Image: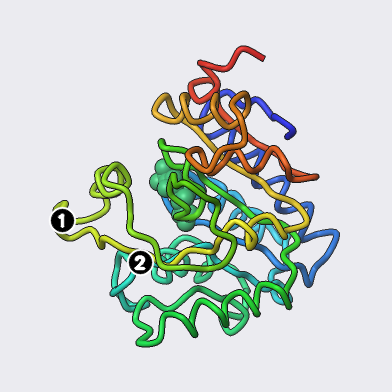
Amino acid sequence: MKLIRAKDYADVSVKAGNIIASVVTLKPDCVLGLATGSSPVGTYKELIKKYEAGELDFSQVKTVNLDEYVGLSKDHDQSYAYFMRNNLFDHVNIDQANCNIPSGLTDDPEAECGNYDKLIGQLHTDLQLLGMGPNGHIGFNEPDEVFIPGTHCVKLAESTIDANQRFFASRDDVPRQAYTMGIWGIMQAKKVLMVVNGKNKAQAVKAMFTGPIDPKVPASILQLHPDCTIVADEEALSLLDL
Ligand code: F6R
């Protein structure tokens, strides 16, 4: 894993934005795997700035998102489909027909997950952007006894519900389940880019870099990826002695 040290969240966002911009510039019809949550918001703002400055063209870019809450429609203001429109897609010249996110409202979860994996296999992601949960989750692959390869429905960890309640009116409103791309879906990407900031991620950052590869710390699997870059700020790196 390659580590890029950043000063703070703003610096993480600039550096990650530059990396994604270079992928889009080198390959205008690239496939970007995208993440939600607070970590990538600044990165998306940087991409929007570059688009507005005429430096980036998203017209041929395709995207595949990591996850979606079970039970939320794409128009629910806490759905990840809504998040992506609000934080990126509505602000650049991407064709939203090329933007893929699992449906939170499917009545056939098995088919939805199987079809999503087929799609991932066809697209072959050029760069997968990730955040990481304080418990080491990537996508919504929560700490577990095994790594689950395919897209699947997951019961969110209590700590994830706690962490994400800030986006909802109350804790009770946070969905208890999500569909998430599995570990294969993430690892098949040609490049992986993680953005991570803040003290509450420091323990997970340390475990990801220095611990064993262990499904109890899902992000530790990234040690096996041939082209994985972590952009982290000083607080997230505060427990790492490298
Ligand atoms: C979101 C996702 C999650 C988040 C993680 C960190 O698509 O896949 O793994 O990246 O929960 O969330 P934030 O960035 O809000 O701390």
Q: Is residue 172 left or right of residue 27?
A: left
Q: Of marks 1 and 2, which one's residue comes earlier in the chain?
A: 2
Q: Is residue 235 above or below residue 150?
A: above
Q: Amino acid at mark 1?
A: Ala
Q: Residues within 10 Å of mark 1 (few under 14, many from 20)?
A: few
Q: Which residue is mark 1?
A: 169
Query: Can you name the residue that lies furthest to the front here?
Result: 145
Query: Can you name the residue that lies furthest to the top here?
Result: 241
Q: Nearer the viewer, residue 138 or 93?
A: 138
Q: Quadrant of the N terminus?
A: top right
Q: Residue at x 75, y 52 (%)?
A: 191
The answer to which quarter of the image holds residue 16 is top right
Q: Is residue 38 in sight in this rendering?
A: no
Q: Residue at x 57, y 49 (%)?
A: 130
Q: Nearer the viewer, mark 1 or mark 2?
A: 2
Q: Residue at x 47, y 46 (%)?
A: 145
Q: Residues within 10 Å of mark 2 (few under 14, many from 20)?
A: many
Q: Is residue 238 left or right of residue 231?
A: left
Query: Can you name the residue that lies furthest to the right here?
Result: 26
Dot 1: element: loop
> Could you give the CA–CA distance between mark 1 and mark 2, rounded to whole angstroms?
16 Å
What colour scheme does the image use?
rainbow
Number of callouts? 2
Q: Which residue is mark 2?
A: 69
Q: Residue at x 59, y 49 (%)?
A: 46
Q: Amino acid at mark 2?
A: Tyr
